[in-house]
Image: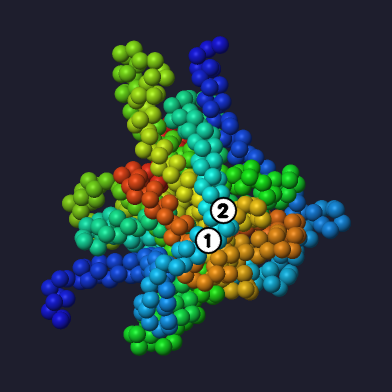
Amino acid sequence: MRWYFRAIGPKKIFEFVALVVFVIFFMGPLLNLAILAFTGKWNYPDLLPSVWSLKWWTFVFQQQDIAKSIGLSFVIAALVTGISIVLCIPAAYAFARIRFPLSRFFLFSFLLTHAFPKMGLYVSIAVLFYKFGLMNTLAGVILIHIINVLMFMTWIPTSAFRNVHTAQEESARDVGASPFRVFRSITLPMALPGILVASIFTFLNSLDEAQGTFLVGIPDFKTMPIVMYSIISDYPAYAGAVFSIILTAPSIILLVAAQRFVSADVLASGFQIK
Amino acid sequence: MSKSFKRGILGISMVLPSFLVLVLIVVIPIISSLRESLKNDNGGYDLSNYTYLFTDKLMRSNIIFTLEITIVSSILVLLISYSLAVYMRFNNGFAVRWIRRTYMIPIFIPSVIATYGLIQLLGNHGWMARILYHLGTDSFPRIIFDMKGIILANLWFNIPFTTMLLGSALSGVPDAVIESAKDVGAGRMRIFFRLILPLTFKTLLVALTFVFMGVIGSFTAPFLIGPNAPQMLGVSMEQIFSVFQDRQLAAATAFFTFLLCSFVGYFYIRSMIKEESVRSS
């Protein structure tokens, strides 16, 4: 055995151990949920379930509030994504292409959304919402969701627009294209991957947002993560695992679909100016 | 009207809507919560809410508990992420390729789900306990509903994101620079401390800010896997606000977490602004 380890070298062994630790730590919890969701019976200390079944799936879909929360979550996430695109994309274009006074001040002001610990900020907002009657309203929930996305929804497209070479826009202008035409057929298509990644990230962020909604949306706006809080304490683990898969599925599907565009560099540009 | 003036107006009007939202949901709440936190029971203004924070025994143990978890988590996350990112930058083996392909997945997993998965995996009679049982160990340490659980959850949430930030910074270190340093005979350690670390130091600071603030302001993980007492400040704030309905005290606690973070936040904002001014000059 020892000659074998020596033959493949300490570096390979180290890498293999690192991979195993990595997979167990990060994928273990998810794999465990995936198994639980299809479990019929699983006694301690068996390694794997003794009976597999789909009964918890029908159980979950029969619960009224669960089905309702799925619809509500998607409506809110779509609204948040739409509103933040309308708000942030023009701003991103302005930061990248137009010279205007105080532009640096405005660009950095978005740091404020990430310069305070989240729960502290949410409580401060809730104190204010309470005064203006925005607690337990759709507008309040949407505003709370927008805080998290405002910065990267502006910064990722800003860096995407900045990466479009002005030479290309200028040569299009030279052959007689109108400014709008240039934006539509040159600038926008080239910046689209960045905008797409930012939008997907926004959509998923809103779909997953739990703590802010928990504070200002209770009792009428029970999105999926909020329902998950009560499922964890009130339902058997199998039902929780099924619901976890339903809640995770949109992330996985969108991530696989946009795999080509999602890279560390694009995402990182949403959290720091490089 | 001159052309540049018109463009200036255009630029500002494109930025203004999102800036106003920012003022509405961040600036005004923070100012009003400061005011709220200074109110006392008789309608006057004083520091009574803050003195309560530091004199109440439970609150004080919550603050210490939160700081302990935050500092331990930040150090662990930065150490692990930085070594992982450096290793991935300069190696290209089979395992590295797989880690590179999958390490960003946890960023997109809802935090409630990840926490639930960790509870199922590491809880009493969870999967891990079962696996260890078959390997011959009968005793399993208490991880869930304990400080260890919260720290593990913090590692789960923060390592992928931090590795992503640092990985992107490290890929910005040009190979040519490292090659030429090797050519003049610099050793590995020297290259790391004289070249790689200084070139990525700023991103390390950004990462520290995100981890530190993320952990201090976290709610989901401590709410679901933390002990009943002491609690992390995020959980205790939510209780003060929703259960005890004491808005003044909740605002004071929130403002106190801002003060705790203002130090790291200051360095983050300053380094960002410095960078941008280098670019525009």
Q: Say which of B212 and B108 sits in front.
A: B108
How far across and how far down the image is residue A60, in percent?
Answer: 50, 63
Q: Say which of A98 and A92 sits in front.
A: A92
User: Dot 1: few (<14), some (14–19), or many (≥20) neighbours within 10 Å?
Assistant: few
User: Dot 2: few (<14), some (14–19), or many (≥20) neighbours within 10 Å?
Assistant: few
How far across and how far down the image is residue B262, in percent?
Answer: 59, 53
Residue at 65%, 65% in the rendered image: B236
Q: Where B113 sits versus A1, above or below?
A: above
The quarter of the picture where residue B19 lies is top right
Residue at 48%, 76% in the rendered image: B123
Q: Chain of mark 2?
A: A
Amino acid beneath label 2: Lys
Extreme-right residue of the structure: B42
Residue of label 2: A68
User: Same chain for the residues at labels 2 and 1, yes or no?
Assistant: yes
| Image colouring | rainbow
Q: Which mark is drawn over residue A62?
A: 1
Q: Is residue A149 visible in this depiction of the protein?
A: no
Q: Say which of B155 and B135 sits in front.
A: B135
Residue at 71%, 51% in the rendered image: A127
Amino acid beneath label 1: Gln
Which quarter of the image is occupied by the N terminus of chain A? bottom left
In space, the residues marked 2 and 1 are separated at their CA atoms by 11 Å
